[in-house]
Amino acid sequence: MSQTPKNPWESVAAPMQAMWTNAMQQYGKAMQTGGFGAPMPATEMMGMFQQMVPTLPNGPQVTFDTTKLQQLQQTYAQELSQLWLQGMVPPTIATDRRFASDEWQRQPMSGFAAALHLINTRMLMGMAEAMQTDAKTKARVTFAVEQWAAAAAPSNFLAFNPDAQKKAIETKGESIAKGMQNMLHDLRQGHVSMTDESKFEVGTNVASTEGSVVFENELFQLIEYKPLTEQVHERPFLFIPPCINKFYIMDLQPANSMVRYILEQGHHAFMVSWRNADASMGQVTWDDYVEQGAITAMKTVLEITKKPDLNVLGFCVGGTILSNALAVLAGRGEKLANSATFLTTLMDFTDTGVLDLFIDESFVRMREMQFGQGGLLPASDLSTTFSFLRPNDLVWNYVVGNYLKGETPPPFDLLYWNCDSTNLPGPMYSWYLRNMYLENNLIKPNKLEVCGQKLDLGKVDLPVYIYGSREDHIVPIEGAYASTQVLPGEKRFVMGASGHIAGVINPPAKKKRNYWTNDELPADVNDWLAGAQDNEGSWWPDWAGWLAQQGGPMVAAPKRYGSTKHKAIEPAPGRYVKAKASVV
């Protein structure tokens, strides 16, 4: 198997670090000579900037809008001069939360380093904007600059971070010793600690809703949950979570468990718990996830409940798998689902947000060569990628706290789940990359063949509830909304506040955030937003009201798990969810 390629940001690390070193050298010269002297010539600015562009895939020849470049150079020179001549740390650095404490004002060297970093960041971002090239290349360069700005911040280095220095003095060096221990611990576990993982145990205080595993195959376990009401809706309900990370994002703790909420609404609920792929699954394909995963789960629920159809939910890539399963069934003339809910799901991959920066023919072909014939995509690849989409929040914030200050991050169930990542079968992953992200074949009628069936989403005619998060960086709101234009049946679209996960996991009792509704579904999401109503609180009650209409009449809740054919195997949450990602 070929060596795993470097992450995209690694390829720009060296030239970006060179830029930071150059800036620090300028600052050192200024300290010695009493001023910054002449501003950096435009040709030198372009030379520095062009160092990183060839490192990007298929790096083009870079040209600039000279008018913007001249304006940028003038602004850059003025800001450098002001920084030196004012003779004090500019208070404006406190608007950046990395430099917000009073210590950055009290320590001139640190404060000046922070101010210089912000000036250089604005300069490089301006140069990215001044580039004359295609939109994707400009977006890639902008992303690279953002990665540099996050990684090279003075707050990430003990020599410049006055908060970490103060703590080291106050603790007589104990914080530094603890920081080294934290770093060694994280090196052993393979990821930066975002929370105190020792405070959580799957099946005890996360994924603790009572239930039983009633079916399993090589891909998933099926969990049946114990009803919380004397009567339940006649039609059963099935969750299909993403196979990236674990199912318990939908069952964190009782106060924020979507599973528990559904049970309280009187639904007879089941959950797919995907297996964390190991070496034995190196040949598993996308077709397997659709046929042996989603379709088998739906049929098993109907066999257990002896009902003709069910209501089903797909979350993120679980929703994409579900859309494929429903299209396969529609092509076969089978209708197992009465309704479907899609949470932050892509079916039309026209707008995939920042992830589009990494996807082109050469990248996909490389992944096909690496994984197409077998093998596993390591959990660390995807988790690292997703973390660096928000580097200040999900990477460097913890580097500073854990290592420079020797702190232990507080317990947070959602971040514990975020770190509990999963491997993926290589053939499944590489097929998904090409046919969904690169070629967007799912929305092309009869273009894809899955499980021996041509796919046409136009035949998936059933009531659907579609949810998108306003600030989602993985499934942009434009991408989530696009499903309304693909599916033919009765549709309701709702937009929630916040991001990919926090927007979804928003229980009503918290009384947090808000959501938007609009019964009209124009082609453009901006037109939908223009007519949308802003509602306070969680979107869950809106969904619950819609789902109640799909659930059918109330009947007596089942008294035991499974059926004669599908007997209880083990208590929820089962073995599969407890398996940690192996190192591959």
Image: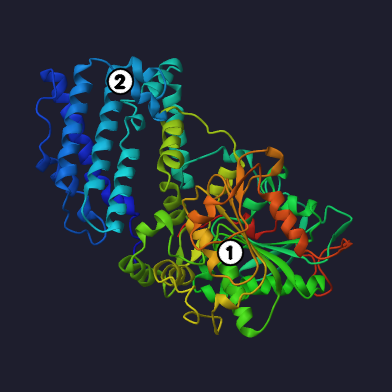
**Dot 1 surroundings within 10 Å: few (below 14), some, or many (20 or more)?**
many
Q: Residues within 10 Å of mark 2 (few under 14, many from 20)?
A: some
Relative image position of residue 153 (x, y in whole percent): 32, 33
* Residue labelled with disc 2: 90
Quarter-of-image position of residue 19:
top left
In-image side of 209 versus 391 (left or right): right
Q: 425 or 123: which is nearer to us? A: 123
Q: Position of residue 17 (x, y in %)?
A: 24, 40
Q: Is residue 271 visible?
A: yes
- Image quadrant assignment for residue 96: top left
Residue 558 relative to residue 503: left or right: right
Q: Residue at x 19, y 17 (%)?
A: 85
Quadrant of the drawing holding the N terminus:
bottom left
Number of labels in the image equals 2
Q: Position of residue 370 (x, y in %)?
A: 37, 69
202 lies above or below 181: below
User: Which amino acid does the dot numbered 2 rest on?
Assistant: Pro
Q: Quadrant of the C terminus?
A: bottom left
The residue that label 1 is drawn on is 319
Position above or below: 351 against 497:
below
Q: CA distance from mark 2 to mark 1?
A: 49 Å
Q: Nearer the viewer, residue 556 or 81?
A: 81
Task: Examine the rendering and report whether any part of residue 476 can be seen.
Answer: no
Please name the amino acid that badge 1 sits on.
Gly
| Colour convention of the picture | rainbow
Residues 265 and 24: in front is 265
> Circle 1 — which element?
helix
Residue 137 relative to residue 443: left or right: left
Disc 2 element: loop
